[in-house]
Amino acid sequence: KAGVTQTPRYLIKTRGQQVTLSCSPISGHRSVSWYQQTPGQGLQFLFEYFSETQRNKGNFPGRFSGRQFSNSRSEMNVSTLELGDSALYLCASSLDGPGPNEKLFFGSGTQLSVL
Amino acid sequence: QKEVEQNSGPLSVPEGAIASLNCTYSDRGSQSFFWYRQYSGKSPELIMSIYSNGDKEDGRFTAQLNKASQYVSLLIRDSQPSDSATYLCAWGANSGGYQKVTFGIGTKLQVIP
């Protein structure tokens, strides 16, 4: 079974641009969660999607948005990029969403650098 | 106040020793707790989960949960150089009717041969 696939692996953008990241979950998984990872803040929760609906959202500005398609693939978008958005963006899939009996499977991440 | 407090380390232990990793959390509504391991340049992977007070053992790993004191710990017995990684504690709690998993900053463990 293929794992969680994130594309692209690396991205270099300049301030003010926008970026779209993609995540394909493990086949059969309906939940996709997105996290931002930085050395100083660790893993910060962005949002979680299940069956095309956003069920939870972290404390990030509105510049960060996401969506999920009917095949469970998810995209996140960051508009008007700032230097502080430079980070590793990880997505994680699970069958029915985060929970006591649910294991999160992480993708390899997209390393975003904002110049 | 951060939701999860975790010493970022690094924590250095000699090979064969017991490594003890700790994490405190602030939300008494937390229901489930997890330990993820992340090797440098890799993505996190789940190694242990625990939901009830007490100890849970899996091979060389033991997770301990004390809800009254709001801490969760991970013991690694007979530490090996291959255990060198960052260990992330995480907890799940209801948010808007669904679980949200929050992570600590992670503790970097170095096992010295």
Image (cartoon, coloured by chain):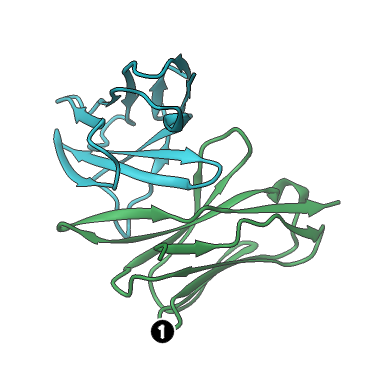
Chain colours: A cyan, B green
Residue depicted at 40% across the width and 19% down the height: A15
Task: Name the quarter where the N terminus of chain B is drawn.
Answer: bottom left
Return the chain for callout 1. Answer: B
Residue depicted at 31% across the width and 41% down the height: A46
Label 1 sits on a secondary structure element that is loop
Where's residue B66, x and y in %?
46, 79
Q: Is residue A12 left or right of residue B107?
A: left
Q: Is residue B28 left or right of residue A50?
A: right
Q: Is residue B32 above or below residue A45?
A: below
Q: Is residue B109 above or below residue B2?
A: above
Can residue B31 be spotted in the picture? yes
Residue depicted at 38% across the width and 69% down the height: B51
Quarter occupied by residue B58: bottom right
Q: Which residue is mark 1?
A: B68
Using the image as rendered, state which of residue A63 and residue A96 is in the foreground: A63
Q: Is residue A95 left or right of residue A109?
A: left
